[in-house]
Image: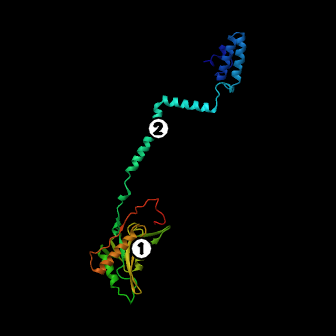
Amino acid sequence: MLENQQEVLGFSDYTLECSGLEQILADICNQGEQNGDTETEEWSESESKSSCVWENVPLVDSEGPARGSLLQQFTALLRAKRLHYMRNRWLSFLMVCVPALFVCVAMGFSKVRPPADNELPLMLTPSLYDTTDFLIPSPSLYSDRVDPSFAEHVMEVLMREKNARNWTEMDNPTCECGETRQVCHFHNTSLPQTMLLPNVTTLNDWLIKTQELYIEKRYGGFSTSLVGDASVLVSWYNNKGHHALPAFISQLNSAILKATTGNYHANITTYSHPMKISKEPLSKDTV
């Protein structure tokens, strides 16, 4: 509206300003100087100028009564704190009782932890994995000084414990080299409980070509050979199974016991007992 009435009111331009805090204080000082008497005016002028100019002047002289010794200042601080906490009883309760309550609750939850004595022993058998085993019925190596009947009898005992199927050419996939890895096409994807293979050469070829099909589905097997004057019974295991080694060795020992005694109800049972030992006493000596 002012811009539209410039010619009528007779002004060319205008500005709007907001007085700062310093300007307001200066105006108050000037008003006080104008309204007082002469003596008061002189004193007010000097004091107002000093209060307006010397802003860093302390309100209380350092040599005044507000200064005390370190002991007096410390005593005054403690008294101020005591009065503060006496007037605010909820704050005293929160600072003293609540932390103690949290400690008691934490100690109570620590008692809820089940004892370590409840850990049960684990029976180690190949049935822990419920996967496909493999077995070579005949010895891979022969010796004229050793009768192979005992080794073959042990393998027969092992074959009785699971449903076995003979290996065929259809169990080996057709593989070709891809850009980054071997690519295999499987003809037979049925997984027996026990795969019977003719010799170690066929076993090695079957293990390599069917690795992708039997991931986490094949943890051990058995074979035998005649070396010198002894029958060597071999237990194969996959180290990805933490209990595969003791489980398959236990099954082989049970088969040896049955073949030796002729009692097919005889058995050797292997257990893994948890070590009841904490972190503190666990050391190289105990291990």
Identify the image quadrant of residue 60: top right
Viewer-side label of 2, 1: 2
- Percent of width and height locating residue 121: 35, 64
The front one of 250 and 132 is: 250
Identity of the amino acid at label 2? Answer: Val
Residue 85 % position (x, y): 50, 31
Direction top: furthest residue: 37
In space, the residues marked 2 and 1 are separated at their CA atoms by 69 Å
Find residue 268 and report its image quarter. bottom left
For label 1, the residue is 207
Q: Which callout, 2 or 1, points at the residue further toward the start of the chain? A: 2
User: Residue at coordinates 33% horizontally, 79% vertically from top-left?
Assistant: 154
According to the picture, the residue beneath numbered tag 2 turns out to be: 96
- At a point 44% along the width and 41% down the height, the residue shown is 100
Residue 185: x and y in percent read 41, 70
Q: Kindly identify the amino acid type of the residue bearing the numbered disc 1.
A: Leu
